[in-house]
Amino acid sequence: MKGESGSMKSPQAATLTPLTSSGGGAWAPWDHLDRLESEAIHILREVVAQCTRPVLLFSGGKDSMVLLHLARKAFHPQHIPFPLMHVDTGHNFPEVITFRDQVVKSLGVNLIVRSVEESIRQGRARVRFESDSRNALQAVTLVDAIHEFGFDACLGGARRDEEKARAKERIFSFRDEFGGWDPKNQRPELWDLYNAHVHPGENMRVFPISNWTEADVWEYIARERLDLPSLYFAHRREVVARGDQWIPVTPLTQPRAGEQVEERWVRFRTVGDMTCTCPVPSEARTLEDILRETATSTLTERGATRTDDQTSEASMELRKKQGYF
Amino acid sequence: MENKLKNCQELLRFITCGSVDDGKSTLIGRLLLDSRSVLADQWAAIEATSTRRGQAQVDLSLLTDGLQAEREQGITIDVAYRYFSTPARRFIIADTPGHAQYTRNMVTGASTADLAILLLDARKGVVEQTRRHAQIVRLLGIRKVVIAVNKMDLVAYGQEAFERVKQEFLNFAEPLDFRDIVFIPLSALNGDGVVLHGEHMPWYTGPTLLELLETVVLDEEILNSSFRFPIQLVTRLSEENGEERRGAQGRVESGTVAVGDEVLLLPSGRTSRVSAIETYAGRISQARAGQSITLVLADQIDMSRGDMIASVAHPPRTGKNFEALVCWFSHTPYDPARRLLIQQTTRCIQGKIETVSARLDIQTSQLIPSPAQVAMNDLVHMGFKVQQPLAFDRYEDNRTTGSFILIDALTHDTVAAGMIV
């Protein structure tokens, strides 16, 4: 992450330049990103105040990078008062894991890694084929890790604009001891009052950037000059055309008979399980290019890139009921 | 003046309220579609569903269809939030179901909204649910309302029908004292008056619904009201002149604060001065409502989470007793035997209900004294007593410091929400 050395000159710093007089002085502009940022900081502080053992779920993807940056702002000048955890599917793009480790090292934060591979070895989770998506299996590993460490709150970078089950989920989302979400029985959430009370074994999933859209995330990343894994930017990659999508050629996703491998300019809009995350054709090599591209995109983030959400209209909802974040 | 203190005008949060058949989902669908917020894959999905169901036209209401359980039962369970933007503004819609019994969902959706759209059917005008919705919107402190007179296509786009409904609503709403009421005739089904004017209502020269949403000026009240700063956390800052400094972390909930201001720490009642305002990006000399900051006081006085830093000139009330209008959320009726926690701003303490003086009949606006029971969706006047003093304002004056939730100490459920009177 940039700025660790104090070299970051973010526009945020510029808008908050010390002002000369009190009260009657000039006021800096206050825009929607400031409002969303302040809301997220408020939520992060509520988690630390109300919960005993929070953890931040960190994948190295853009949303969790934003969340991590917000956590630094929220607790400044102190260190982030909770560990990070990555539930590793074993199906990650190697660039993302390298990036994740760089970020953790540069910030000096504690990262816990729990792997789906290990859950499979222990017989806690099963797969039919090595190349099956492990998104759903993450829930098993996650819930086991929650119990192992006694976490009572897991902070995640999910957004309500991503998907319709998420659109109905609370910012502080109560989960029973199996990690399950009960959409019909959610705690009412009014004003900015968050009820994070849980009994031992139960936990909260907290989504501080619930109200952000994909465009907000990209604008914020550009404004704060946050680093991201290289996958998000246009690069040459071997892909095959399958249906409406471009499938990346990886050890887990091999071309099928009759499919032609092509090298194309692509980038990823989301980074996730290699077996179900597809790139989109793109020549956006800078954050500014991405902002322009996002503004004119004709497909949703998940629609363009995730094959697992397309299997069933309710797949996210089902996964959440089973403990997925 | 370019640098005048302004609220964020770029983001508008609104709630849509309508009865089951008013075409609310269709209206939201139309708003999303005609503002080009529906992307190709979303369109393809609802097109496929409409075809599968044998519908001739693509069913726009499918765009806001949520969960599997809802699709199976054809109902809306809860509050959903939708996001869309135009070059002029970003919008967050709180979409709440229209069922008569779901007062609680509307209360939830309205609690964070700046504006409300009430849907009326041009053929039916003001109905029972309109009264309920308007009352709730007003109780929750929303003073700007848009009356969307829908289904104009079914009254031949006639101006008389529109004027009749308008007059009917104005007569009914007079005592509610809304600050701004705008009436817009529209047909969500065909699109007239939603984003585009259409050709059917040349007599209507006002803005379309989207034009209005894009240009309505948001209240600056939160900036002009008295300074309130509930403390979320107390943090240790770097030493200065050999003195250890502590900072109060929180968000300015109303008003403004500047270095040098004299402030009051509540509930202790001690006064001090603001010696610094810290943020991640560095020190600032003043902060405004909405901003998350770390506040440093000149005196080393004892402060902790749940305390409030406030304006000396216009302090909030403090005390262990207050009266509130409460909306009961729990499926279980109020039971005096259950222990309750009261969470107000950043303070969560034990409290009890001492009186249940009256129930508000939302239909007639009448107060019914001494109700026998308090059940889900009831609005009741209650008297509270809490363990330790709270700093609070009337909800009418301050939505943040005047609101609270009740938590069942045993089950941890949020059982009710209250607005201090």
Image: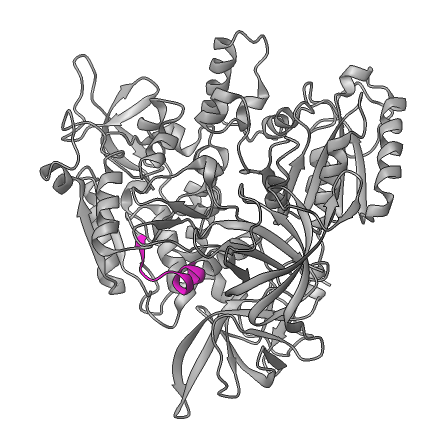
Q: Is A324 situated left or right of B132 in this image?
A: left
Q: Is B95 situated left or right of B211 in this image?
A: left
Q: Which residues are magenta?
A: A44-56
Q: Is residue A49 magenta?
A: yes
Q: Residue at x 67, y 72 (%)?
A: B316
Q: Residue at x 79, y 23 (%)?
A: B122
Residue closer to the observer: B296 or A221: B296
Q: Is residue B419 above or below residue A97?
A: below
Q: Residue at x 35, y 53 (%)?
A: A199
> Looking at the rendering, which quadrant does residue B184 occupy?
top right
Q: Is residue B414 above or below residue B19?
A: below
Q: How is the model colour-coded? A: one colour
Q: Is B115 situated left or right of A293 in this image?
A: right
Image quadrant holding the C terminus of chain A, namely top left
Instruction: Decide if residue B10 is in sight here.
Output: no
Q: Residue at x 18, y 17 (%)?
A: A256
> Looking at the rendering, which quadrant does residue B382 occupy?
bottom right
Instruction: Decide if residue B236 is in sight here.
Output: yes
Q: Is residue A135 magenta?
A: no
Q: Is B208 situated left or right of A242 in this image?
A: right
